[in-house]
Structures are given as structure tokens and as C-alpha cells.
Image (tube, rainbow, N blue to C red):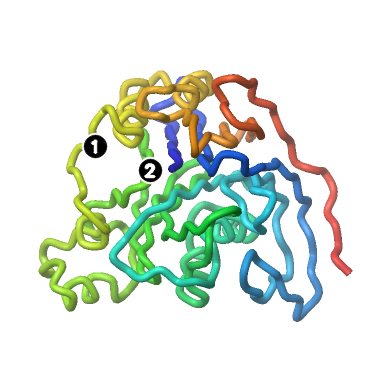
Amino acid sequence: MCDTFVALPDATINGDVIFGKNSDRPSGEIQDVVVIPSQTHPTGATLECTYITIPQVEKTLAVILSVPKWMWGAEMGANECGVVIGNEAVWTKEPLRNSGLLGMDLVRLGLERGKTALDALKVIVELLEKYGQGGNCAEHFSMNYHNSFLIVDRTVAWVLETAGLYWVAERVTSGTRSISNNLSIRNAGTIRHPQVIQYAIDNQWCKSEDFDFARDFSDGEVSDVPSPNSREGRVRQLCQFNRGNFSVETAKSILRNHEGNICMHGDFVSAASQISSLSEAGDFHWFVERPNPCQHEYKQISFPTISLVNR
């Protein structure tokens, strides 16, 4: 129920990279923005994610995260190296699991461990293949889904879309790109799970020459051109309309837009919002950590200047 977008340097007024996301969550769920310094962990340390425990790495990067209070993971965030990530719920033909890493856990793990967008993508897919994704994704009722991710640094964006253990990633180097709650990669992507095409062929979802990840793995029909009245279509339309003139103010106007329910009100609400500007001259991050970004100002959040040692 979220929307995430990026405008790369050729699409922005100042030549920076601009990232934005509204985190749409069940009404009444509280989301906090937290700042966590880089930390060094002892050998053999473990990490308790939302539902499972995995090995900890020796050093984690400083992160700014927008976190639903009840879970370990994050809906979106940034790290000290200029990487930002947001995830989306998607529904696929692959079975859902009752336990594993939440998509939000994978967002946080990618940010804590990835110094570039590609590094963060590799972190996510390695953990996905090893531990799987699964578990209830809501605080007060049952909701389970698979995930897609927009992973961005100062020069490039990656769209990573998953179905169970399978995944495809698309490298984006120019223009704008957005993701919503549907699979959107309409081919084999730039890189992919090594068995994903053969798996689709074995299930008679495609032939080898016409693999289409979104079409073949989606649980339902996939539109070639999303309706401009839908959230997905409206965000895409606004991003493309502002190509070449994109700014932080543009990002704010999109995330506050009510056409297509981009700024969502109701049983699900836009519970938090993030905008980031990334460039070699500096990275800047703004958050709204309460519902309805249409009603509140974005607050700039900065990184800590010290590191901690866990003992």
C-alpha cells in the first residue's frame, strides 16, 4: 500500500538524486524515526530480527530508519554511505511463509550492511535465499506478503522484486522510476536468481524466449500501462511529468497528492514519509513521522558523529 520513487541526476534541477516514499500502514500503527550510530559487534554475535535470529556482522553502518514500533525492521531509511531503501508489499504465485525475514527486516539489513546500492541489493538477496521471507506484517491483524525494493545511492537505482525465494533486479541509471504494490519488471531484469527463468518454464508460465517476471509471477493480471487513476499510475505520471525539473519540493508535492490515494487516509494511512537528496556535495534526509504528510512539515534528520561498540 506504499509508493516509492527516485529521480536520477539527469531528471533533477540540481543534478542530485531524489528519493521519496510514503509508508502506508494500518491506521493506528505508530512509526518512529530512529538514528542508530555505526556499531562494532563481537565475533559470534547474533541478531534478533522480527521473527528469527541470524548471525550478526562485525560492523554495521550508521542508519536513519522509519520503524513501526512493534517490529525490528524498517519501512524505509538511509545509511551513512548515501544508500536509501524503501520496500513495497507485492502478491505473487509463490506460497507465503509463516516465518522468516520480513521485507522490512531486509530493508534495515541492507542499509546496515551495504555501502552502495549494489552492495545492499546483494545483502538482501543473499539473506532472502538463505532465510526466506515470511511472517505476519501487521500489528493487530493477519497480513502476509512478498516484497519489492527500490535501492538507491548517489549514482544509480536498483529495483529488486521478489516472489518467495526468487528475484529479479533492474538497474536504473537515468530518468525516474517508481514502484508500488505490483511487480513491475517486465523482462528478465539486469541480474536475477539463477533458476528463476527455468522455474517459470517448468511451471508453464512462459517459454524461454518470452520470460516476463511481473506477468509470470504476479498473483493476478498485470497491466502494461497502469491507470493514471491508480496510485501506481499517478506516481509514475507525476514523476515523468516533472522529469528534468525534479526537486525536493516536487517530491513533497507528489507524496502529499491525494489523486490515486498517494497520500492515503482511511483504514490504511500514510503513516510516515521520507525524502532524501543524495549527491557528492552531501546527503540530506527529511522525514514525517506521523500520519498524513499532507498536514505536516518534513523534518531534516542527520547522522550521529560517533560510533558505538556493543559489549
Residue 149: x percent and y percent?
45, 51
Q: Is residue 55 left or right of residue 11?
A: right
Identify the element where label 1 is drawn. loop
| SS for dot 2 | strand
| Side of 62 relative to 4 (left or right) | right
Q: Residue at x 30, y 33 (%)?
A: 230
Residue 292 as seen in the image, left or right of residue 202: right
Q: Quadrant of the N terminus?
A: top left
Instruction: From the image, tell me which residue sits under label 2.
Output: 179
In the image, what residue type sits under mark 1?
Pro
* 10 Å crowding of disc 2: few (<14), some (14-19), many (20+): many
Alpha-carbon span between mark 1 and mark 2: 11 Å
Q: How many marks?
A: 2
Q: Nearer the viewer, residue 37 or 50?
A: 50
Q: Nearer the viewer, mark 1 or mark 2?
A: 1
Residue assigned mark 1: 226
Above-or-below relation of 174 to 212: above
Q: Earlier in the sequence, mark 1 or mark 2?
A: 2
